[in-house]
Image (cartoon, rainbow, N blue to C red):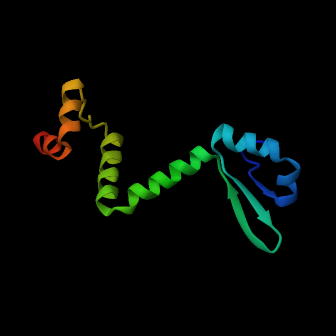
Amino acid sequence: MTKHQNILSVSEARANLKDLIEHVTADSTPAIITRRGGEPVVMVSLSEWASIQETLHLLDSPANARRLRAAIEDADNGTEGLLLDDQKMAAFAEDPAKFLNDQA
């Protein structure tokens, strides 16, 4: 199964289940399994599913979504972020809000 062969029928999935699972987990490429007369389903690895769920959780808050988009834009533009040494990590762990306000 190649990366481009990720759409298959239930019968094909059943016949090649072990290879399908290996493919899905090896390169995080989802497999779409079609069903005659039913809605298709998607097979993803557990780690990929956890990543999707975490992303949905983070984007559920409009404030988080704005911060994430701004961080992605900064990274795309080459903007350097804040580097934390042990002392800064300790200050952040003690009072995150104060630490972030002090950095602004």
Residue positioned most to the front: 94
Q: Horizontal and vertical percent for residue 18? A: 81, 42
Is residue 92 placed above or below 35 in the rendered structure? Answer: above
Residue positioned most to the bottom: 37
Q: Is residue 63 left or right of residue 38?
A: left
**Can you tell which quarter of the image residue 95 is in?**
top left
Q: Is residue 19 left or right of residue 94?
A: right
Q: Tell me what residue is drawn at x 83 percent, y 60 percent.
A: 10
Q: Horizontal and vertical percent for residue 65? A: 34, 57
Q: Is residue 32 left or right of residue 95?
A: right
Is residue 19 placed above or below 12 in the rendered structure? Answer: above
Q: Horizontal and vertical percent for residue 57? A: 42, 57
Q: Tell me what residue is drawn at x 74 percent, y 39 percent.
A: 22
Q: Horizontal and vertical percent for residue 5? A: 77, 49
**What count of labels does the image hold?**
0
On-image quarter of the N terminus: top right
On-image quarter of the C terminus: top left
Residue positioned most to the top: 86
Q: Nearer the viewer, residue 14 or 104?
A: 14
**Can you tell which quarter of the image residue 90 is in?**
top left
Q: Tell me what residue is drawn at x 26 percent, y 36 percent.
A: 81
Residue positioned most to the left: 102
Q: Tell me what residue is drawn at x 58 percent, y 44 percent.
A: 47
